[in-house]
Image (cartoon, helix red, strand yellow):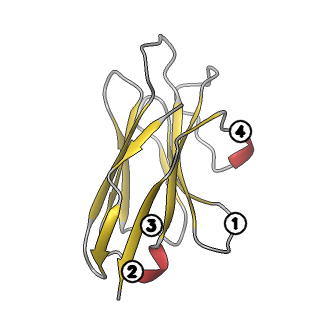
Amino acid sequence: QLQASGGGLVQAGGSLSLSCAAPGRTAVRYVMAWFRQAPGKEREFVATISWDGRNTYYSDSVKGRFTISRGNTDNVVYLQMNSLAPEDTAVYYCAAITNLRPYNYFTDSVGEYHSWGQGTLVTVSS
């Protein structure tokens, strides 16, 4: 299971950084992503990154405010969140596709992700 950390409480306009790591070492580099789920809502896509780190894709709601990145060697992914707003309040989940994919592959389809973290709560106060 992926291990996520970094959530917390922040005021609107502030920033937070999340991180997530896949335990153990593997020769396979994972496509990784962040999703979020607000109270009473379905889980939604936030951002994804290919395993070579050169291709990223964001939901329209976070584009220009959030940045996804990853470590150079291990399956570690980060989410830098700036200009946070109350509507960003949610439990954030990291996810990984643990089967081999092309180096430039990424997807926002929740069904393609095989491994999930436990979720970390982000609360943005107005």
Give the image location of residue 19, x and y in percent: 35, 44
Disc with the residue nearer the chain's start (3 vs 2): 3
Residue located beneath label 3 in the image: 63
On the image, the x and y values in percent for residue 111 come to 74, 43
Task: Determine the CA span between mark 1 and mark 2.
Answer: 19 Å
Quarter of the figure with the C terminus: bottom left
Proximity of marks 1 and 4: CB atoms separated by less than 8 Å: no
* C-alpha gap between disc 1 and disc 4: 17 Å
For marks 1 and 4, the one nearer the N-term is 1
Quarter residue 99 falls in: top right
Q: Nearer the viewer, mark 3 or mark 2?
A: 2
Which residue is painted at 46% across and 73% down in the image?
89
Q: Which residue is mark 2?
A: 85
The relative height of residue 88 versus residue 68 in the rendered view (above or below) is: below
Q: Is residue 92 above or below residue 42?
A: above
Viewed as shown, does residue 91 lie left or right of 17?
right
Where residue 97 sits, quadrant-wise, is top right
Question: Quarter holding the N terminus?
Answer: top right
Residue under pointer 4: 112
Q: Amino acid at mark 4?
A: Glu
Nearer to us of marks 1 and 3 is 1
The secondary structure type at the circle numbered 4 is helix
Q: Which residue is mark 1?
A: 42
Upstream in the sequence, badge 1 or badge 2? 1
Q: CA distance from mark 3 to mark 2?
A: 13 Å
Q: Is residue 50 left or right of 14 when viewed as pictured?
A: right
Classify mark 1: helix, strand or loop.
loop
Marked residue nearer the N-terminal end (4 or 3):
3
Which tag, 1 or 3, sits closer to the chain's start? 1
